[in-house]
Image (cartoon, rainbow, N blue to C red):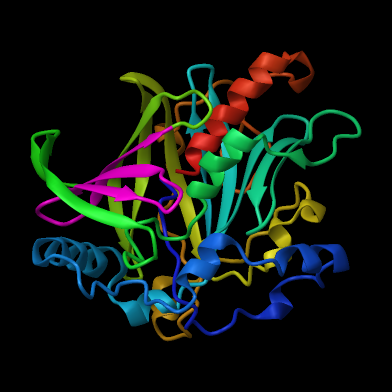
Amino acid sequence: MFTFTRASGAAEPEPAEASPPAPPAAVAASQSQSAYAASIQRLDSMDTTGLSPDLVTVLTGYYRNSFTSQEHWDLVESIRFDGTLHLEQGVIRFTAFKKKPDYSKIVLFLPNDGRIVMAYDGADAWQLQAFRPGAEPIDMPADEALNFIRDATTGGHLLYPLVAGKTIELVGSATLNGRRHYDLRTTLPDGQTIRSLLDMANYAEAQQTTLNNVSGLTEVTTHGDFRVIDGIRLPFVSTLTVDGEHVHETRIERVQVNLGVMPWMFSRSSGANVPDPLPAVAPAAAASQSPRPLYELSAPDPRSQLRLGEAPFDPWSTQSAFEMDPADLSEQETADILNDLKAVAK
């Protein structure tokens, strides 16, 4: 669902005044360049030079319909997603941030100000269970970090097809929900593979399949309710299945673009911090402003939220509608929630 965005660095810098000064330790941590960032440094995100004609046709259609153009995509620096994770046990609210090229942070809100956080700042993958006294950020386990870092890229791995050691193949076609799709296989430089099904009519990435490095199981994320926002197409509903069994559904309620998100906000020293939201800009006003407006994509309908309990509907509340006491969670239940949350980042 967060299979979204990242670019070649031609965008204008985001306004630093939107964020507090970075702690010195955070600055040092964020200055390390990831292998991914280094690999794309001198590349254009949509350059298909030298690829097979059929693959060029498909990728060009995907880029045009998903990002409008190279120049348009370059103006996007960061994205904030707010939504709900629908599990068998109930519904949990989350906020997720992505910043080019591969910064990622997901915060899941629990009752009594409890939070579960996972993040990657381009060098360090860490997590925090902030519903226990004295909780501190810890290393993300190595195999879990492989999943999270793979999915941290802004824009997904169909961008930058010319990265050294990476291949994208058009392996055929497939049918999904009665519609024909192009079947693409992306092999990353580290050997991980991603299968993408692109709708033949509109090039939307309707489904993505990956291998979970922890469990060894195949995970399939099916996207729907696509909406084009300021020239960028995003799925607002995503369903995860593992070996054919439904795990959860993710629903996006609000997306904000270019909020002045800074690299230090993804470091361990940022902990469970989530910047306060900015007021939404009306579409008419946004059209006449700079290329970094704030977009409210849809007015959430409380009747459409399949939640437990009687929590009032508030898209910015940190109170989860998932009625439970974090102190009652066993270690295994906590691990299960973390695994579900990590799948949101796909």
Q: Is 47 situated left or right of 117 in this image?
A: left
Between 50 and 77, the one nearer to me in the picture: 50
Find residue 250 and report its image quarter. top left
126 inside magenta stretch: no
Q: Is residue 314 visible?
A: no
Image x and y of residue 203, in percent? 18, 56
Q: Is residue 227 left or right of residue 332?
A: left
> Residue 82: percent from the left, percent from the top?
53, 49
Please give the range of residues in magenta: 184-211
- In this picture, residue 3 sits left or right of residue 15: left
Residue at x 72%, y 65% (from the top left corner): 30
Q: Relative to residue 307, is residue 47 drawn left or right? A: left
Up the image or down, 40 lies above or below 2; here it is below
Is residue 247 positioned above or below 43 on the image? above
Quadrant of the image for the N terminus? top left
| 289, above or below 69, in the image | below
Q: Look at 69% across and 57% down and name the residue there.
A: 266
The answer to whether residue 204 shows anywhere in this view is yes
Please name the predominant secondary structure of the magenta segment in the image.
strand
Looking at the figure, which quarter contains the C terminus?
top left
Residue depicted at x 32% and y 58%: 158
